[in-house]
């Protein structure tokens, strides 16, 4: 990402330069068998923990819950693991639905447009209920926005997990 916050800094490093790296933020998401629907909201590279949870559910559950994955990126070429997500949703069409939204979409883009909004989350995620969980991961401002919107939509703290 030439215009990204991190890529230009990494590109400017020289052999022997020091780099301070922060460890993972947030804990593991544990989903009880009683959970029947899971919403995932990923901002950019925040897809990484979501994909791990989805693979874990696919491997470990005989009855897969309904999974709704919302991926937010700037441009279509920024979508990480797009082919992998398409394969997963094709393998589990009744359980996994993937929705992509771009903040800088090309004219011919048929997916979502823009950043997370209350209307978009309400339309794509399972509605708040005791058996529903929503997990999200992205940059700090993205995470704050998603948490606020989920609260406005009526999701209780026990239904939510931020990575």
Image (cartoon, rainbow, N blue to C red):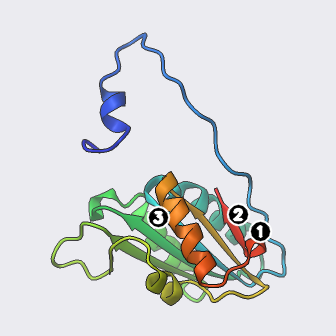
Mark 1 and mark 2 in contact? Answer it, CB < 8 Å: yes
- x, y (%) of residue 100? 39, 74
**Quadrant of res 117:** bottom left
Tell me the residue that label 1 is attached to.
60
Q: Say which mark, if any, is on residue 4.
A: none
Instruction: Determine crowd level at label 1: few under 14, some 14-19, many 20+ residues with C-alpha closer than 10 A.
Output: few
Q: Say which mark, if any, is on residue 84.
A: 3
In what element is the residue under mark 1?
Answer: helix
Tell which residue pokes out farthest to the left in this image: 107
Mark 2 and mark 3 in contact? Answer it, CB < 8 Å: no
- x, y (%) of residue 5? 35, 41
Identify the residue shown where x is 63% and y is 58%.
52
- x, y (%) of residue 85? 47, 68
In what element is the residue under mark 2?
Answer: helix
In the image, taking residue 104 as reference, residue 88 lies left or right, namely right
In the image, taking residue 112 as reference, residue 161 lies left or right, namely right
Quadrant location of the N terminus?
top left
């Amino acid at each position: 990402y030439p215009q990204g916050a991190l890529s230009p800094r990494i590109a400017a490093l020289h052999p022997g330069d020091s780099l301070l790296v922060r460890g993972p933020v947030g804990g593991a998401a544990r989903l009880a068998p009683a959970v029947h629907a899971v919403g995932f909201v990923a901002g950019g590279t925040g897809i990484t923990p979501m994909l791990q949870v989805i693979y874990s559910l696919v491997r470990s559950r005989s009855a897969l819950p309904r999974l709704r994955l919302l991926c937010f990126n700037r441009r279509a070429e920024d979508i990480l693991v797009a082919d992998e997500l398409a394969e997963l949703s094709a393998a589990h069409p009744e359980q996994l639905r993937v929705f992509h939204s771009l903040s800088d979409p090309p004219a011919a883009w048929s997916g979502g447009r823009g950043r997370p909004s209350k209307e978009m989350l309400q339309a794509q995620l399972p509605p708040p209920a005791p058996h529903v969980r929503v997990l999200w991961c992205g940059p700090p401002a993205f995470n704050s926005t998603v948490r606020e919107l989920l609260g406005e939509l009526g999701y209780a703290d026990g239904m939510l997990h931020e990575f």
